[in-house]
Amino acid sequence: MNRVNELGISLSTALAADNQIYTLPGEAFPLGSSVREGGVNFSVYSKDATRVTLHLFANADATGPSRSFELSPALHKRGHYWFIFVGHIGHGQYYGFQVDGPWIPERGLRFDCEKVLIDPYSQAIGFGRNYNRQRAIGSGDNMDACMKSIVVDHCDFDWQGDVAPRHSLTDTIIYEMHVAGFTRHPSSGVVKAKQGTFSGIIEKIPYLKSLGVTAVELMPVQQFDVDDAPEGRDNYWGYSPINFFAVHADYSVEKAPLSAIDEFKTLVRELHKADIEVILDVVFNHTSEGDEHGPTFCFKGLQNGAYYLLDKETGQYGNYSGCGNTCNANHSVLRRMIIDALHYWVTEMHVDGFRFDLASVLARDSQGHPMKEPPLLWSIDSDPILCSTKIIAEAWDAAGLYQVGSFIGDRWNEWNGKFRDDVRAFWRGDVGYVSRFASRILGSPDMYCSRHHSPHRSVNFICAHDGFTLNDLVSYSEKHNEANGEGNRDGDNHNVSSNYGVEGPTDITEIESLRHRQCKNMLATLFLALGTPMLNMGDEVRRTQQGNNNAYCQDNELSWFDWRLVDTHSDLLRFVTLLSQLRTAEPTIDWNMHMSLNSVLEDVGIRWHGIQPEQPDWSESSHSIALTVYHPITQDELYVVCNAFWDPLEFTLPDRHCSDWHLVINTAKPSPHDIYSIEEAPLYPRDTILATGRSMIVMVAKATKAVKTG
């Protein structure tokens, strides 16, 4: 037999006619599928594989390959990489791998030659009509029910001279949203075909601009498996990634993988035109393959131990994510892939930053132990391609590693979970929270001063996708997750919430009035505090999930943004809009640009007060605090009263350096008297002011008539 045939090359290679598929040995770099002149190069990592077969498919629905190529270890492997070049194929080609090797689960080896695997570097993934998650679990082949990788060439998209906004953190207001949930509700006003899509968001850009948003933080858009959910439900949130590069196809108008790429790029381009940045919520801490009882889609069948934390004695999966497996993020192979994925989203997709889900997982070594100098996190911190991006850590994991205030490096920002909890507790009226509340509104110096961090290290939030919405925070004392089908056992029990007398919706005027005021109190705290504010989708109009604090599997009106609320709670929307304008227009709020928290607290005059000037009550039983902020350059002053006591308190106004006090915010007043622009704030002529129980007051004394406009 001819030697060339033994090595797996067709004799027709050198004589291939036009449009006839042929093969060449190929190259190990770059990983994944890369379009080259005349064809596509494929490369995949699998150290312990004994046989690798590349399958080409006609389309997503194909139940078997149109062509298959068994890779020869002698010709198509160098080191731990398998590769092959296939001629006369290109953009849009569907493919997958079958990989054989040892099955020794107790040693972490789980090669299953019957399963079709996607490429870990896939930039698009197709799900045929016969796709079946269950067929990827246990024994038996799934050739006719598998997902498939797709070759992608990015050369055709017109970016129209796209330029990233690159807002400083001082000027940033983040809006966390679910791509589909933002416009899927019939009331969105978006054309039906575009509801729940990237294109749907484009139609709502004017709304985001009017709200003062400078960055949208998109919940996961990496391709995820909607079937990774309790029976009869869908995975709605998307924290179940199949792959780190591909765009979730269902978020496109055509529900097609390649269309999704262009539609996502169009969204980024149009947001940039509106001076709005795009931050992606990325999930590198676990995948949808789950534990030993889960499916084999990709990583398990290629090199299980390179991608997941495994018990060295049993081969069982470490579970620091709460989702069945944990990524071995500091393994050289996975670390490289995560960096490559981040580079891809920045260079090819033009995104502006990342929020890392359960980022503390990424600080664990292969044994699951926290590392003092985690290579992946330092690599992200110092990477030149990522140097202009915003990087935000959810600085905890599901196994108790809580690193808020102590996450590595100077570039990393942190979701400040303590801000959320302490602000909620203070306004609820809990005992012993005045000092903690004071620290949170000053950028959490108790957490960040010792490391000389900027106040914007702290990404402040009251609510996020995970937990109660703002409306539910003031309407429910307990979670109500029965719709999830888990007996209300799922979701956090620690919500620091209150119903103020009635569980759920009520027509009782006094209760509803208090709830509305508490919403304004917490929103005003969020926008006026030092740090970078993040607003949860729909909180500006009191979106409700009916007490469900873990709506990850609720792809229905329970989770979607009901746009009728824009009219129902137009007064609150106005309140938030003016808050965002106030944040960017008033120097006594915008006084911390490019300064460490230590410098801010040293250089800016901050005085604490109680009901009498200079007499703050820091006792455990105190429920109120006031402060003045003096701007050393403009000489403007800000006076803030936070009364979380249930009864009214009369505060004597402190002396000011120059001008008279003007009333900007009083959350106890009805709209439009609850908030004014700086230019329209009325003069307050008296020496005392009555703060209604559970209310917030903000006053400004302007040294000059000049007003900052942004």
Image (cartoon, helix red, strand yellow):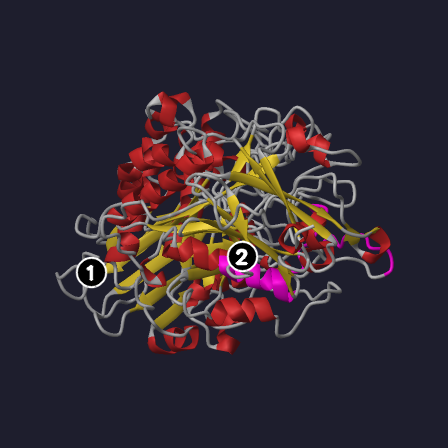
Residue 470: x %, y % from top left: 48, 40
Is disc 1 surrounded by few (<14), some (14 to 19) or many (20+) residues within 10 Å? Answer: some
Residue 660, numbered label: 1
Q: Nearer the viewer, mark 2 or mark 1?
A: 2
Is 593 positioned to the left or the right of 226 in the image?
A: left
Instruction: Report the front residue among 185 and 308.
Output: 308
Q: Which amino acid does label 2 sit on?
A: Gly
Is disc 2 surrounded by few (<14), some (14 to 19) or many (20+) residues within 10 Å? Answer: some
Res. 557 visible in picture: yes
Q: Which residue lies furthest to the front in this view?
A: 1
Dividing the picture into quadrants, the one containing residue 146 is top right
Q: Which amino acid does label 1 sit on?
A: Asp
**Contact between labelled residues 1 and 2, with CB atoms less than 8 Å apart:** no
Residue 379: x %, y % from top left: 52, 70
User: Label 2 to label 1, Cα distance in Å?
Assistant: 76 Å
Quick check: 309 above or below 598? above
Please state the extent of the stretch shown in magenta in the rendering: 313-340
Residue 344, numbered label: none
Instruction: Report the front residue among 120 and 653.
Output: 120
Label 1: state its secondary structure: loop
Is 139 positioned to the left or the right of 696 in the image?
A: right
Instruction: Report the front residue among 119 and 236.
Output: 119
Residue 377: x %, y % from top left: 56, 67
Name the main secondary structure of what is drawn in magenta. Answer: loop
State the residue position of label 2: 26
Residue found at x 53% / y 60%: 27
**Counting residues from the N terminus, which is met first, the one under dot 2 or under dot 1?**
2
Residue 592: x %, y % from top left: 34, 68
Instruction: Report the front residue among 279 and 494.
Output: 279
Residue found at x 19% / y 52%: 683
